Each structure stands twice: as C-alpha cells, then as structure tokens.
Amino acid sequence: SLAINATTGSINITNAASESFQIWYVTNGACPDSSGVNVQVVQDPTALVQMQNDVCLDNVVQIDVITTAGTSATYQWILSGDYDLISGDLNGPGPLEVNWSETGLQSATLSVADGGCTATSTATIDVIQIEASIQGASLLLLGETTQLNVIVSGSSSNNLSYEWSPAEGLSCTDCANPIASPEEDTTYTVIVTDDAGCSDIAIFAIEVFSEPIVVIPNA
C-alpha cells in the first residue's frame, strides 16, 4: 500500500507492491479543486550472474543469470579481457558461452534495466594456463641416478597430479620428483594436471654413457 502524508502530500512507496495506483489530490474551501494521476509502482529487478570459479585457458565456460526482470527488460553484458563469444547475445538475458584467451582473473558483469529501475551483478573466474618443465642431469654414466624435479607455474592449486612415462628407470610414476636411473638413452614425459582439470606436458631427455665422459678443452 501507499503511505500519503496528509499535510505535505508526499507519498511513500516503500511498502507498495508492484501494481498501479490512481492518486487524487483534492483541495477544499472556497475554491475546491482536484487532480488525479496514475502511478505504476515497479519493484527493483534482481540479477545474479553465475559461473564456475576457474577454467582452463581456451576452454569454453557457460555464464548463467537468475533475474526477476520482466519481459520488457533490457540487458547489457560487459566481459573483461580477451575472449571469443561462442554463443549468446551481449544485449540479451543469457546464458552466454565464452572462451577466454587471456589468463588471470576475468569478470562478467550484467546490467538489467526494467521500468526505469536497474540491477547489476558481477561474477569472476580464474583463467588458468599451467606450464610445466623438468630439471635434472641430462648426462649420466650407466648406474648413476638423477632426481627429476617438475617445476609448475600458472596454477595456484596445491593438488597437482603427475603421470610419468615410460615407467622404466623411475622410482615412481605419480610423484613430482622421481629418481631416474635409466640403463639407456631415455626421454621421459610427465603430464601435470591441477584440480581444475588444466594440464601441461613436459619432456626431458637423458643420455646414458657406459664410459666416463671426457671433455677436452679447446687449445
């Protein structure tokens, strides 16, 4: 309902529902008069943008929205970073399918306008690109060992998984730092995957010699 101050004529619509009202202002006395106006009270629309917390670089993510806006509402999306819009309309209610090609924290903001009232919602996502490399001795005498250390960048995850191949000559195939003791020249490969499903492959070659390696300096 509307609350009208009889003294000042001010109208409080704080508790009014979304409906139409006809308001009349009447004066009494020697010169009585009246005037009426139709008022349409519209509730502020609500909007909630939703998407996953993280995604691998160049993977498609779906962006959804929950809104109370009516059928006549207008929409405007603003997306950060470099991206390709796979499906959806930046001037529509969603959902959108987006492929971000830039790593880091990205955002999707939706502004909804309905009956002169507006609502805005933003969701963020971490676009991840894992990069893995291997450190260790690349030249070994037969019978020697070296520890292979995987260096990972681009992911903040503490839950990384490792898959080494071939298994021959390795102390483990699912750890970050296996001991390698190959009996012949071997190229090792490791696939590193984080808990978001993002992965990278690193390769490391080891040459094995049966006799000591002699290095002759230049004269």
Image: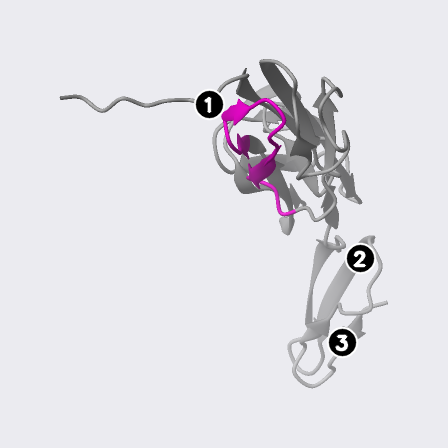
Pointer 1 or 3: first along the chain = 3
Q: Which residue, as the protein is rendered here, is positioned at the far left?
A: 219
The nearer-to-camera label among 1 and 2 is 1
Q: Of the residues shown, which amino acid type is indicated by label 1? A: Pro
Give the image quarter of residue 143: top right
Residue 101 seen by the camera: yes
- List the residue tagged with mark 1: 212
Question: Label 3's element?
Answer: strand
Say whether marks 1 and 2 touch (CB < 8 Å): no
* 163 and 17: which is toward the camera: 163
Distance from disc 1 to disc 3, alpha carbons, whole Å, reads 100 Å
Pointer 1 or 2: first along the chain = 2
Q: Position of residue 165 (x, y in %)?
A: 71, 19
Distance from disc 2 to disc 3, alpha carbons, whole Å, reads 12 Å
| Position of 171 relative to 41 (above/below) | above
* 91 and 54: which is toward the camera: 54
- List the residue tagged with mark 3: 4
| Position of 209 relative to 25 (above/below) | above
Q: Which residue, as the protein is rendered here, is positioned at the far bottom?
A: 7
Query: Is-magenta flag for residue 153?
Result: yes
Question: Label 2's element?
Answer: strand
- List the residue tagged with mark 2: 21
Q: 10 Å neighbourhood of mark 3: few (<14), some, or many (≥20)? A: few
Give the image quarter of residue 24: bottom right
Q: Position of residue 98 (x, y in %)?
A: 63, 26
Q: Which residue, as the protein is rendered here, is positioned at the far front?
A: 211
* 9 and 199: which is toward the camera: 199
The nearer-to-camera label among 1 and 3 is 1
Say whether marks 1 and 3 touch (CB < 8 Å): no
Q: Of the residues shown, which amino acid type is indicated by label 2? A: Phe
Query: Is-magenta flag for residue 93?
Result: no
- Residues shaded magenta: 133-156
